[in-house]
Image (cartoon, rainbow, N blue to C red):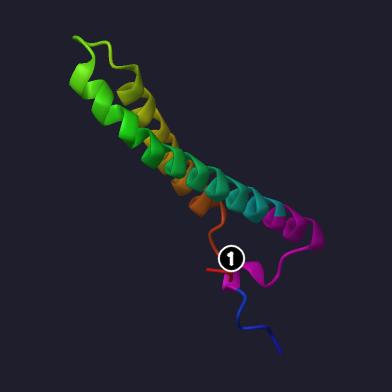
């Protein structure tokens, strides 16, 4: 009897395809971990961003730009990692 917990498109995969699927899901988890680290640092950078926006003159706001960059990277890595990990049963 077929294992019904496996998605229908993955039930008839060859062993080499299963290995590729597992590697893809491992990379997805890796990217999700990296996204979590970037999100953590983006929260920490928020403290310095407020001070930077208050006291820096003109367009010279490096901490603000760094905070925006880390936030964008967190979202990007998170979405890409989730896309790579699609179909996994761990969610």
Residue at 27 percent of width and 22 percent of height: 52
Along the viewing direction, whichever of 77 and 37 lies nearer the viewer: 37
Looking at the image, which residue sits at the far right?
Answer: 15
Which secondary structure dominates the residues rendered in magenta?
helix
Q: Does the image show residue 80?
A: no
Q: What is the x, y in percent for residue 64?
A: 30, 25
Along the viewing direction, whichever of 12 and 75 lies nearer the viewer: 75
Along the viewing direction, whichever of 79 and 60 lies nearer the viewer: 60
Q: Secondary structure at mark 1?
A: loop
Q: Is residue 68 left or right of residue 86?
A: left
Q: Does the image show residue 28?
A: yes
Q: Is residue 80 left or right of residue 52?
A: right
Q: What is the x, y in percent for residue 24?
A: 65, 51
Q: Is residue 19 magenta?
A: yes
Residue 46 occupies which quadrant of the picture?
top left
Q: What is the x, y in percent for residue 48?
A: 33, 29
Q: Is residue 24 left or right of residue 53?
A: right
Q: What is the x, y in percent for residue 60?
A: 27, 11
Q: Is residue 47 magenta?
A: no
Residue 65 occupies which quadrant of the picture?
top left
Q: Is residue 46 above or below residue 85?
A: above
Range of magenta residues: 7-22
Residue 15 occupies which quadrant of the picture?
bottom right
Residue at 51 percent of width and 43 percent of height: 37
The quadrant of the picture occupied by the N terminus is bottom right
- The residue wearing badge 1 is 88
Question: Callout 1 environment at 10 Å: few (<14), some (14 to 19), or many (20+)?
Answer: some
Q: Is residue 63 above or below residue 11?
A: above
Q: How many marks?
A: 1
Residue at 50 percent of width and 53 percent of height: 82
Residue at 62 percent of width and 48 percent of height: 30
């Amino acid at each position: 009897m077929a294992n019904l917990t496996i998605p229908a498109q993955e039930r008839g995969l060859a062993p080499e395809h299963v290995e590729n699927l597992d590697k893809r899901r491992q990379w997805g988890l890796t990217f999700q971990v990296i996204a979590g680290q970037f999100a953590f640092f983006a929260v920490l950078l928020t403290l310095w961003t407020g001070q930077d926006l208050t006291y820096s003159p003109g367009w010279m706001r490096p901490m603000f730009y760094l905070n925006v960059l880390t936030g964008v990277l967190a979202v990007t890595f998170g979405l890409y990692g989730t896309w790579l990990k699609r179909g996994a049963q761990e969610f």
